[in-house]
Structure formats: C-alpha cells, structure tokens
Image (tube, helix red, strand yellow):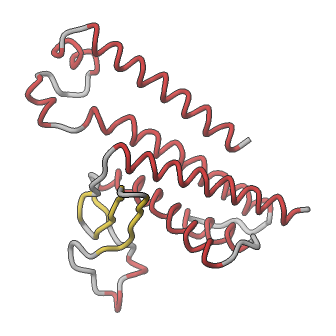
Amino acid sequence: MFLDTIQQHLLSLTSYIRTFVELQQRVSPDEFLKILNIGISTVEEFEDSRIIYKFPIESLVTMIHFQIDSFFGDICSQAETPKNGFYTRMKCVLASTSIEDKKKDKFQNTLQCLAFFRNSFHNAGHHTINKARWNGRAEPAKGILDRTFSKDEWGIKFKHKEVIAYNWKSAFLLIQDSVAVMQLLIMAIYATDR
C-alpha cells in the first residue's frame, strides 16, 4: 500500500507539471506570473528567483518523505515501540530487519539525506547539523560537511548553515534511491514477519 501511495503522488505531480507547462505556453509570461499569485509579477523578478522551478521537486520530496515517515511510525506502533522523530523511527525499523550492517548504513544515509533535504525548507534552504551531533557542544563552523548523497556524477552536499545546492536530476535521484530503499526495507520486514 505504501508504494502505491508514492506512485499516486508521482502521477499527481506529473499531471501538475504537465498542466503547469501547458498554462505557461498559453499565456504571456506576465499573465502566467499573475495566475500563479506567488508575489512575483515581472519576468525580471522571475528570472532572478528560483522559486517556480524548485516548487514541484520540493513538493515531491516533502510528499515522499512524509509517506516514509508515516510508514516508519506505523511499523514502530505495531511493534509497540512508538518512537518520536524520523531518525529514531528509521533506526528502529532498520534494527528490526536482518539486512547486513553495510547496507543499513547506505540505506540510512539515503533516507537521512531525504529528511535533511525536506528539513532545510524550515530554514530557507539551509542545512543545520543537529545539536546532538555537535562535538563537545561547540557549534560546527559554517560549511562543515555533514552528509552527502551521490549517484553517478550527481550529488547533494549537506553543509552546516549553508544552502543546499541541488538540481532536478540530483533531487530526482535522491527520491528514486529512497523509494528503492523502501522497497527493499518492505521486503525485509515482510521476510522477518514470516
């Protein structure tokens, strides 16, 4: 059921993007910006901003991450070990499987990068290293690398107090890998329950 929900979100987003592109082609650029009603009214402002192009992929990341977080919460509740926070729920679910540690670490990195990506939206696109991970309670310097997602030549680096730099391809690959991880986790959970 979980992967079906993600598929529904992907189909919805595809439809949204198609409609978005068609509308953009049917009206003048200034009229298009007025219809969007996002506070940008001229083509110059539009070209200086990155808001419109980022919105669909950020929305998809948010929807996918919330589905994964909800799934982990359900698994923890069924095991009668409710956990607060995505990281704690993720660790609980990973620990309940017989997946080898090296794969668990890779899975955790992918899913944590997805969570960091979504969490950056709370902070104007900036990543912040969790205070529980500060060495000796001293805040890390700006730009300290916290975590990296990479696939092929594409990647996303999460540096302390810096805006996360990404493009559609790197965000898409992060989503794709997160969904693949979830598929393997679901199969591992099902195998454990048998």
- Where's residue 123, x and y in %? 30, 56
Residue occupying the point 46% across, 53% down: 174
Q: Is residue 98 left or right of residue 155?
A: right
Classify residue 22 by image quadrant. top left
- Whether residue 23 is situated above or below residue 126 in the rendered picture: above
- Where's residue 3, x and y in %? 67, 43
Classify residue 129 by image quadrant. bottom left
- Whether residue 68 is situated above or below residue 39 in the rendered picture: below
Q: Quadrant of the N terminus?
A: top right
Residue occupying the point 82% across, 58% down: 190
Q: Is residue 99 left or right of residue 58?
A: right
Residue occupying the point 59% across, 50% down: 179
- Where's residue 99, x and y in %? 71, 72
In the current view of this chain or complex, which residue is farthest to the right?
194
93 or 73, which lies in front? Answer: 93
In the current view of this chain or complex, which residue is farthest to the top?
26
- Where's residue 26, x and y in %? 28, 7
Q: Quadrant of the C terminus?
A: bottom right
Q: Is residue 107 left or right of residue 73?
A: left
In the current view of this chain or complex, which residue is farthest to the front?
152
- Whether residue 78 is situated above or below residue 26 in the rendered picture: below
In the current view of this chain or complex, which residue is farthest to the bottom?
136
Residue occupying the point 34% across, 92% down: 136
Number of marks drawn: 0
